Amino acid sequence: AASPALTSRVPPPFQGTTGVVLVNIGTPASPSVKDVRAYLAEFLGDPRVVDVNPIVKFFLLNFVVLPFRPKESAEAYAEIWDKERGSPLAYHTEDLVGKLRERLGEKYSIQIGNQFGTPSLKSAMTALRQSGSDRVVIVPMFPQFTSSSTGSAAELAYKLGA
């Protein structure tokens, strides 16, 4: 028979739900210049996205990119933004979550976790902890593997899961 000290340290089999986080880059909260600027600042501020000296990056972002690019990007977002549902990336991901919930059932808790913007990867991981998920599957939704997308998301997920 196993010693009592050993059996008290062995975790029980999984009892809670399996958390699934669909991870994407994210999207601005709206196509307004203000929201697009905030999104771009967060996105381009990631050290894996713009990999240059931090001082150069500060000047590049604050004096070259962020004063001008948000207006152009906001116009492009406005062209694809759905008046009822918002960002196509957001609502298509929400639709996918709904279908996964139907298909997988109550044993799975499915969340959206964006690297930048909301809902954030941090809020998704917090929701899974609070709901009693005792294991988490991270599903990168990027069409390719790069350090600036999947690598950055994996790094953040590991930090949040620790």
Image (cartoon, rainbow, N blue to C red):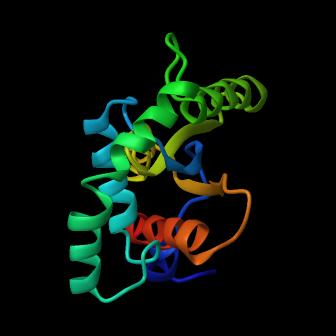
Closer-to-camera residue (137/155): 155
Locate residue 48, reporting x and y percent: 45, 77
**Residue at 36% across / 53% down in the picture?**
40
Asked if residue 13 is positioned above or below residue 91 in the image, the reply reads below
Left or right: residue 60 compared with residue 133:
left
Locate residue 160, reporting x and y percent: 38, 64
Closer-to-camera residue (141/42): 42
Q: Is residue 119 visible?
A: no
Q: Residue furthest top?
A: 84
Count the marks.
0
Q: Residue furthest right?
A: 103
Closer-to-camera residue (36/5): 36
Closer-to-camera residue (60/9): 60
The image quadrant of residue 58 is bottom left
Asked if residue 150 is positioned above or below residue 18 in the image, the reply reads below
Left or right: residue 129 compared with residue 25:
left
**Residue at 42% across / 43% down in the picture?**
72
Q: Residue furthest bottom?
A: 53
Q: Is residue 93 visible?
A: yes
**Residue at 21% across / 75% down in the picture?**
59
Q: Which quadrant of the rendered structure holds the C terminus?
A: bottom left
**Residue at 37% across / 86% down in the picture?**
52
Q: Which quadrant of the rendered structure holds the N terminus?
A: bottom right
Left or right: residue 34 compared with residue 22:
left
Left or right: residue 97 compared with residue 99:
left
Locate residue 109, reporting x and y percent: 57, 37
Locate residue 152, reporting x and y percent: 50, 71
